[in-house]
Image (cartoon, helix red, strand yellow):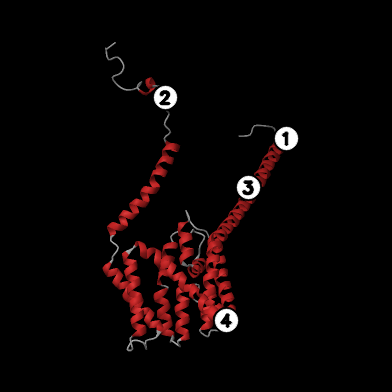
Amino acid sequence: MFCGTAAEIPNLRMQDTSSYIKICAFSEKAFAEMKNRNVNMRELQLKEGLRDGIPIALGYLSVSFGFGIMATSLGLPVWVTVLISMTCLTSAGQVAGVTVIAAAGGCLELAMTQLIINMRYALMSLSLSQKLDAGFRMPGRLAVSYGITDEIFAVASAKEGEISRKYMAGLIALPWVGWSLGTFLGAFAGNVLPAPLKAGLCLAIYGMFIAIVVPPARKSTGVLVVAVIAVALSCIFHYLPGLRNISDGFVIIICGLIASLAGAACFPIREDTEREELQKSQAQTEPMGDAAFRTKAEPLSDTTPQADMTENIPGDRGNGND
């Protein structure tokens, strides 16, 4: 209760008003600093995504160059070839799709081919969705699903913690530019370069597929057997007279399904093997975390006198042995 005189009441109100103004000014300043900090954080995340996407973009630039030459050599115009790369963003799917288009295949055949080849992207999107932060809405998730490739998925999955929209935007942007630009350069060069040189450069994209298959095939017998089965079936469909009339799109579907089913039946991945691999990965990361935890939370002192360590042990005092 205020017990001062009536003359002191206006002064008290003025002090309260000035304090209120100072608090408001401080709050506005803190809010502005927080807003600037968030803006800087988003800029850093965007730059980090762009930096991580540079190696992918450089690799796509060279690989899509071969795709552009191959597509134009099959009779596709330059603008159609570039439009395919800008909208599909899948190397194996584009090669198979262009082959079906050049062979005058139907829409059902083209759609089934793309579904079989690109089914892995659905699994990648499902896995990567667990790492996206709360800032992603449905349009952002759809944009990420459009931009996912094998390399982008690998880089994003290896990143620690949650993934922001700015980071994914930077990570997808440069590879998309590299893939589209390489396709344009290859398609343009396909109309200028001589035929022998074009035939050699068309093999670049197949070299990428070989580089993807050979390393895991050397480590896993199952991958090697599946690849051999697919190649053998493809040769059978190509050379046997009765099967030669089947279109390339259905050949890809049949070979892929049979080889995959054979690999799943003959070389299943057992749960024990998955559990052992998970335990090995945890064993590699847990010791460092435990050591850091003990260092921060449970420091041990090597200079503690022995008398202090045994001071409170029952039975050391007054045992009558003195």
In the picture, the quarter occupied by the C terminus is top left
Closest to the observer: 264 or 46? 264
Q: Earlier in the sequence, mark 1 or mark 4?
A: 1
Q: Distance between the residues labelled 1 and 4?
A: 100 Å
Q: Which amino acid does label 1 sit on?
A: Ala
Q: How far apart are marks 2 and 1 (CA)?
A: 65 Å
Residue 231 in the image: x percent, y percent?
36, 75
In the picture of the structure, the residue carrying the numbered disc 1 is 7
Q: Which amino acid does label 4 sit on?
A: Pro
- In terms of secondary structure, where does tag 2 sit? loop
Q: Which residue is drawn at 36% across and 65% down?
A: 217
Q: Which of marks 1 and 4 is in front?
A: 4
Q: How far apart are marks 3 and 2 (CA)?
A: 46 Å
Relative to 156, 308 lies left or right: left
Q: Which amino acid does label 3 sit on?
A: Ala
Closest to the observer: 294 or 270? 270
In the picture, the quarter occupied by the N terminus is top right
In the picture of the structure, the residue carrying the numbered disc 4 is 194
